[in-house]
Image (tube, rainbow, N blue to C red):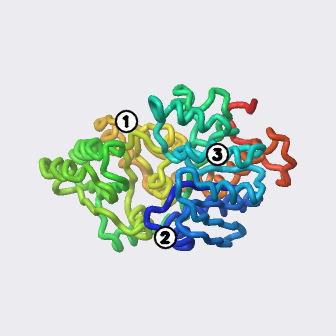
Amino acid sequence: MQVGFHVDAEQRDAKSLLRAWPTLSAVAKASAGAGVHVTVVQAAHRKEIVERDGVTYYFVDDTSRRPARVFDRVASLAPDVVHIQGLSAPRATRPLSRAVPHVPILIQDHGSVVPAGWRANAWRLAHSPIAGVAFTTREQAAPWKRAKVLRRNLPVFEVLESSSDFTPGDRDEARRATGMSGEPCLFWTGRLDANKDPLTMLAAFELAAAKLPDAWLYCCFGDAPMLAEVERRIALSEILSRRVALLGRLPHEELETRYRAADFFVQTSHREGSGYSLLEAMACGTTPIVTDIPAARAIVGDAGSLTKVGDAPAMAEAIVKWTARNRVDLRRATRLRFDAALTFDAIGGQLRAAYEALVGVRGVDATLKPATRAPMIEELR
């Protein structure tokens, strides 16, 4: 049973919410495709039940921090394993464990920040009953264990947060459709905030563009607390003011064509749970030039460039170096990496293996067909 406590601020109905949060249904469908009987229980503003792709979704009308009706619904369905989406609902985690006292609980991180001070103590208590935790890569669990928010011997599973249904397409056709150009053409998506670090991105592009006179950078973004700083930085540079386009917020369905039009996807994040934009770019075959953070290392593999966080000269050097490579070969290698390890089918297999491992630890009679060994980094104790 996959459980979500995050409450939709727009109070949308179930079908609208499933459209707005595509990962919710895509991950459930992927798990079902791997042979798991999946049920989803989601806190919501109204009570609804939806059947889709072999999965039943229970939207429970309880948006409190300790949603008792959600706990009751979970318990009434007698799950073998409970999979909570997100580490950021500690007030709900412990009472849920009491509602299903003999059921193993897996919590999956979605980019939460390790709490400090009294909050670390509260989160430690809340997460003490769980049986396992999932991150994109093992490295991401280390700071949580150092802070003792998660116990030292808690099993860690490597599971991607999401994937993408985007596909590669004709670059020239995509450029005609979007008006994008450049040799190379670089594309950025993400918030304009300190974590995404757009100023490092601009500094890197400025240095690279001095050696690549036809390079262009296109920036798509939603929330933009640093927009004024970004605009000032661009205005102060002759290179940036001529060759950077700020596109603002774009419809999600348009992004596939934008990725196809670009030669490289650039990202200068300091921290990511996984990287939805990175996954979408690689699904389109767009080669990533991104910062060397744990999630990016796990996702990119050898299909792109990884540079030190905050190091604009290193990223500029990478842009110049990768521009000289054969683009057809790069696109092929990027999509091959995606097909090998980053699809929804891969996520379904990772989750199934994690569920089976946790069911086995509690001695529950599993009805799943045999699967490969769980991608667990630390042995179950």
- Sequence order check, earlier mark of 2 and 3: 2
- Sequence order check, earlier mark of 1 and 3: 3
Give the residue at x 27% y 54%: 215
Q: Position of residue 124 (x, y in %)?
A: 57, 33
Q: Measure the alpha-carbon separation of dots 1 and 3.
A: 39 Å
- For discs 1 and 3, the disc positioned in front in the rendered view: 3
Which residue carries the number 1 mark? 309
Which residue carries the number 2 mark? 12
- For discs 2 and 3, the disc positioned in front in the rendered view: 3
Q: Secondary structure at mark 1?
A: loop
Neighbourhood count class around disc 1 (C-alpha, 10 Å): few under 14, some 14–19, many 20 upward: some
The C terminus: image quadrant: top right
Which residue carries the number 3 mark? 95
Cβ–Cβ under 8 Å for marks 1 and 2: no
- Whether residue 209 sits left or right of residue 342 in the image: it is left
Q: Position of residue 117 (x, y in %)?
A: 45, 29
Give amino acid for label 2: Arg
Say whether residue 240 is visible.
no
Give amino acid for label 3: Pro
